[in-house]
Image (spheres, rainbow, N blue to C red):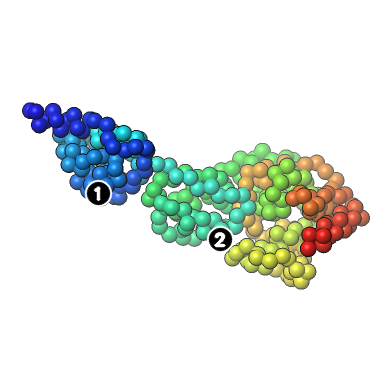
Amino acid sequence: MSGWFWLESRYLAPGPLAQEKDVIVEKGAGTARIARELAAAGVVEDARIFRWGVRLFGDEAPLRAGEYRFPAAVSAAGAARVLQSGQTVQRRLTIAEGLMHVEIRAELLAAPGLTGVIGELPEEGWLLPETYHYAFGDARADVIARMHDAMTVLLAKAWADRAEGLPLKTAREALILASVVEKETGVAAERPHVAGVFINRLKRGMRLQSDPTVAYGVTGGAAPLDRPLRRDDLEHPTRFNTYVNKGLPPTPIANPGRESIEAVLHPMATDDLYFVADGTGGHAFAKTLREHNANVAKWRKIERSRK
């Protein structure tokens, strides 16, 4: 009886862990192996006390595999309850707005704890940039499916609430234009204005003349363009070149975020038809070609001074 009480007291006593720690328990690990791993990680002081304590004093709930966070000074009994809870550590993967599929694929492959192949991706543009939580051992394909489902739901709702009179026939066309807006500006406040310019150009049958569509056409979406655009790029007739082709590109050129989708479906009411970089990270907008040419001249001067 004294041995029983001694074991129980050691099983319930505070453990040696000085600060909280994450430990991964692999699938298929039995109680003995888990006990050794917890002892090696410094979560429990003695693997034998954990193993026998679980057998004699624990309930029937199994010890589950996964990544768990153990609090400082957790007892062996408390460590067992953590493993029985199934409440694994939630990791975070943040996908930035405007990434292409090839870039998202690279981030998924580099994300620690994700497993499995990615497989075939949906069409460019159909993965929602956002922060996604996952657990150690989750499948990359499952994260991709969540990203696709999130974009599908968001776009359907945004399309249903769209402004009237837009020159867009389908939600997919809205997604295409949103991807262009996303790549044109990194200034959040400008997105509705940029969208308003493109909407005006579409209504008038003007070419969009968007540099990011040209860049996407040069690489075919296989990689970001690693050099500045050249004049011959603007004249090269790819399917995505909106200097050559009227209307929208055939597919999105990136994965747009919520703000760009909202900007396209609720664009700023403006008479502007042009914009160009202004040297501050934003753009100078213009209603006429004459005003635009003056803004372009200012931008060229800024470029020359920087060189």
- Image coords of residue 162 (percent x, y): 69, 40
Tell me which amino acid carries mark 1. Ala
Residue carrying label 2: 102
- Image coords of residue 61 (percent x, y): 24, 36
Find residue 304 and report its image quarter.
bottom right
108 relative to 56, above or below: below
Relative depth, front residue between 46 and 161: 46
Relative depth, front residue between 40 and 63: 40
Please give the name of the residue rendered at 31% of the width and 34% of the height, measured from the top-left corner: 73
User: Could you tell me which secondary element the residue under label 2 belongs to?
Assistant: helix
- Image coords of residue 251 (percent x, y): 64, 58
- Image coords of residue 305 (percent x, y): 82, 60
Of all residues shown, which one is farthest toward the left?
Answer: 1
Find residue 234 and report its image quarter.
bottom right
In the rendered structure, the answer to whether residue 125 lies left or right of residue 41 reads right
Residue carrying label 1: 29
User: Could you tell me which secondary element the residue under label 1 belongs to?
Assistant: loop
Please give the name of the residue rendered at 59% of the width and 65% of the height, measured from the top-left corner: 222
Relative depth, front residue between 233 and 159: 233
Please give the name of the residue rendered at 48% of the width and 45% of the height, measured from the top-left corner: 92
Relative depth, front residue between 178 and 20: 20
